Amino acid sequence: MAEIVLDHVTKRFPDGALAVNDVNLTIADGEFVILVGPSGCGKSTTLNMIAGLEDISDGQLRIGGEVANQKTPRDRDIGMVFQNYALYPHMSVRENMAFSLKLAKEDPAKIKERVEWAAGILDLTPHLDRKPAQLSGGQRQRVAMGRVIVRTPNAFLMDEPLSNLDAKLRVQMRTEVSRLQKRLGTTTVYVTHDQVEAMTLGDRVAVMRGGEIQQVDAPEVLYDTPTNLFVAGFIGSPAMNFLPGKASGRVLKTALGDLRLPADRSRGLDGGERDVIIGIRPEHFEDAALIGTEKRDRGATIKAKIDLLESLGSDKFAYFTVQSERATAKHLEELAADAGTGDLGSGEEGVQVTARLDAASTAAEDQELEIWVDLEKLHVFDPESGENLTLGDAAKTNGSEAKTTVQRAVPATAENAEPTDQPETE
Amino acid sequence: MRSTPRQKLGWGIANVVVLVIAAVPVLWLVSLSFKDPSTLTDGSFYPKKWTFENYRGIFDQPLFTHALVNSIGIAIIATVLGVTFGAMAAYAVARLEFGGKQLLIASALLIAMFPPIALVNPMFNLWRQIGLFDTWPGLIIPYMTFSLPLAIYTLSAFFREIPWDLERAAALDGATPLQAFRSVIVPLAAPGIFTTAILVFLYCWSDFVFAISLTSTNNARTVPAAIAFFTGASQFQQPTGSIAAAAVVITIPVAIVVLLFQRRIVAGLTAGAVKG
């Protein structure tokens, strides 16, 4: 087990393409860090560089304090779970798991003991003598995990290990992975494009875009205080609603009406007039009828006709249209392109807004509804740089150093008052 | 789609026709080899007078027995060398980026396209000067050269089929590139290696052009060349029976090899490696 440090790590492919650009990340011993981002953001390349499967063009990689740039995968002593499992098809489950120990010339009795221990943890004992072809998808996935845990490597690397499983199994294996990591306490770097996996699994999540880390933080911090439009739009499902607007002082002129920001959320606004993009998460809307007067005062109320209502039992999703231009920014275009929604909705008929209402709401389709917006949770972004202006200066620092400062900027609400369980980084 | 009885009948007839067309010449050869010399030309498909004389005759001749040993030895050595070098080259072609890769592929194709007969004359002269004429290496070298393109092309196709992640997994499990090649790639490419080996073996086994031109004695003469030197019992007798018997004898090892490895060739060994 070891700490992994990426120090200004850059990957430039021979054709000149810059896959990873100046990434700084310190993964503490025993920490579970997620690299998340849309396809092509460099997350897998970063993982492969840690594994030693890709050369590092520039910068330094340190594993357990030692520079590992020139080390072969074999000398780095790292275990990796591949997206397609990469089990050796001609070997039984037992041989698959024993392969690394055999190569390390371990004592046969010890190999047997370790393999059986790993099989016990992963419920693979009855399948030890089968070939991978005879196993189900979930079992193959567990063999891939088993192959990694039989030895005690410096770190586990996982490259979208659950993406080939069907939805139900994926949720089950997600908790399994989390439990296993906690039990073994091994430093883990996990790559995924699924923000739900990222939010649920990691001690910390690094959001990547175009080869650069946008923000590294605990999942709750990432969700509540995204440093820019990209992170805000990427994390959260359904996604944050974005609307263009004009700020003058603390007042935002938007299609939802004139919104007056609370003092502590307008630090990044210098008082002058400027174009902004506002972001509101679906759950920060509420049926105004269900809001007490005291809470009502810290927000604004708007009237909207509900186009579509989806009731999930626990919540209701209300979709309504706001007469407005579509918010345009580079970050948002990238997100739309990744989600494949870039060409959806021309914007001529306005912008669709998603609101997550309490199940007790009496909202109905094609009916006007008074909707309350929580202004204390509203985000204001710069359309050019994508920077989150509500955070003030705190957002400008990047990487792990930003963690403490960002956390101070979070209003102490009930959801994030709990201390996040994460080891200290140096 | 389920086939109707009519379709089944149609396909059955078509299969029988193809089988008959393919099998008749072989069966005829077998029949000839069992015929007594006096009934050779009686025009009957079945031997009217059975005899093993032809077989006994050829195994009594040092011309044939030496040739058989030469054939087996030369073909096996050429196959082993060709497949080994072919596998290494094919692995490089399939997996690595290196300067001159296109040149290698192109020149391999060029060799495959080159008519061997055009090389016979210069090689005859060269081999005589450097002492390779009428020796085993003298045949093994051209066989290897001409079978390498085939080996490289088939094997690189097989190697490409093997997911690269398997090698990466092996590397992370602590295998050196050689260990990964030996314990992961080669076992998985086994069907491809067997297929290639059989093809290369068949080529070496049945070659006539080099065998007849680059040998002069029992030292290195292989069976296809030796058959041409068969003579009848007297100058008035055709050696047809002996030739037929020799042809049957040299077909047997090939048939055995193909039957033995047929299952391995067909087996899809990579099933279950990755999600499929």
Image (tube, helix red, strand yellow):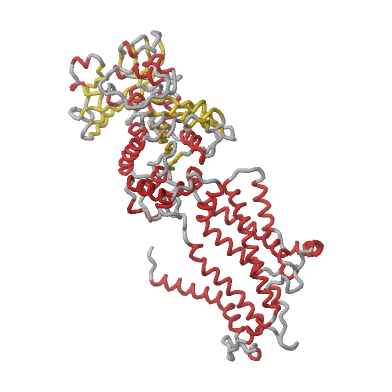
Q: Quadrant of residue A155?
A: top left
Q: Give A310 or B126, whichever is nearer the viewer.
A: B126
Q: Position of residue B47 (x, y in %)?
A: 58, 88
Q: Is residue B99 visible?
A: yes
For the C terminus of chain A, the quadrant is top left
Taking the spot 65% from the left edge, 68% from the top edge, the residue there is B73
Q: Position of residue A177 (x, y in %)?
A: 35, 39
Q: Quadrant of residue B119?
A: bottom right
Q: Give A196 or A340, whichever is nearer the viewer.
A: A196
Taking the spot 49% from the left edge, 72% from the top edge, the residue there is B15
| Vertical order, A132 against A234 (above or below) | below
Horizontal side of residue A330 vs B59, given as left or right: left
For the N terminus of chain A, the quadrant is top left
| Vertical order, B270 against A182 (above or below) | below
Taking the spot 38% from the left edge, 27% from the top edge, the residue there is A233
Q: Position of residue B78 (x, y in %)?
A: 65, 63
